[in-house]
Amino acid sequence: AFMEKYPGVSVTAEFTGSSAGIESLEAGSVDIGNSSRSLKDEEKAAGCVENIVAIDGIAVVLDPANTVTDLTQDQLVQIYKGEVTNWKDLGGSDEPIVVVGREAGSGTRGAFEELLGLEDACQYANELDVIAKVASTPGAIGYASLDAVDDTIIAAKLNGVEPTEENIKAGSYILSRPFVMATMGEISAQSEPVQALFDYLKSDEGKQLIQSVGLITVD
């Protein structure tokens, strides 16, 4: 979209992972290092500047008949590790918990597991279209990007906090992550094309593009 607006500029994206993106920035081989996590103190000390351009929210979804609509972070981790397997143990009905997740390679799955420290520890019963499966399966629990939530399921509170755009922006909902486009030094010190890209992301057109892929804009 940016190159259509500025045909004289070529933008090349390399999908190498957050840490590799920041390492490339520090090495001077890229203009921008993309990261789907906050920058580490040592990365900032090396001169990397954290420019947050969007926020991603992940909702924990339950089948519509579930009476347990508020989970703590610890309870959620226990469910996905297979340590709690019946809703009655969480104050709900005597019903097995059906754990649903996204397929391997899903960015939503990667973020969910990373934020909760569950990498390679989840005990999934199904890995597929989460919303449809949870909506039609008694006792099911899953997760999905906030933009995918509809009225066929319940979006659970976590630690008493609802997964709303306002709560995610405020930092009170735990399952969210920043989308960072890091630069070496402030944006104002970058080349004209790099500054133009950041200006584009801040524009109404850029914000609409961010929202169109299910992300939350930053003010």
Image (cartoon, rainbow, N blue to C red):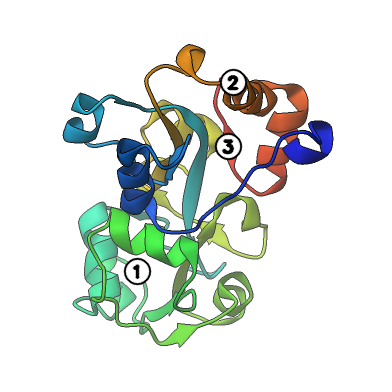
Q: Which residue is mark 2?
A: 195
Residue flagged by tag 2: what amino acid is it? Answer: Gln
Residue furthest out toward the bottom: 125
Label 3 amino acid? Ile
C-beta proximity under 8 Å, tags 3 and 1: no
Three-letter residue code for mark 1: Gly
Name the residue rendered at 27%, 24% in the picture.
47
Front residue of 105 and 117: 105
Q: Residue 148 location, x and y as percent?
A: 64, 57
| Image height of 131 relative to 207, above or below | below
Checking the image for residue 92, the label placed there is: 1
Image quarter (top left, top right, bottom left or bottom right) of the C terminus: top right
- The front one of 2 and 143 is 2
Give the SS element for disc 2.
helix
Q: Read off the residue under disc 3.
A: 216
In the image, residue 91 above or below residue 169 = below
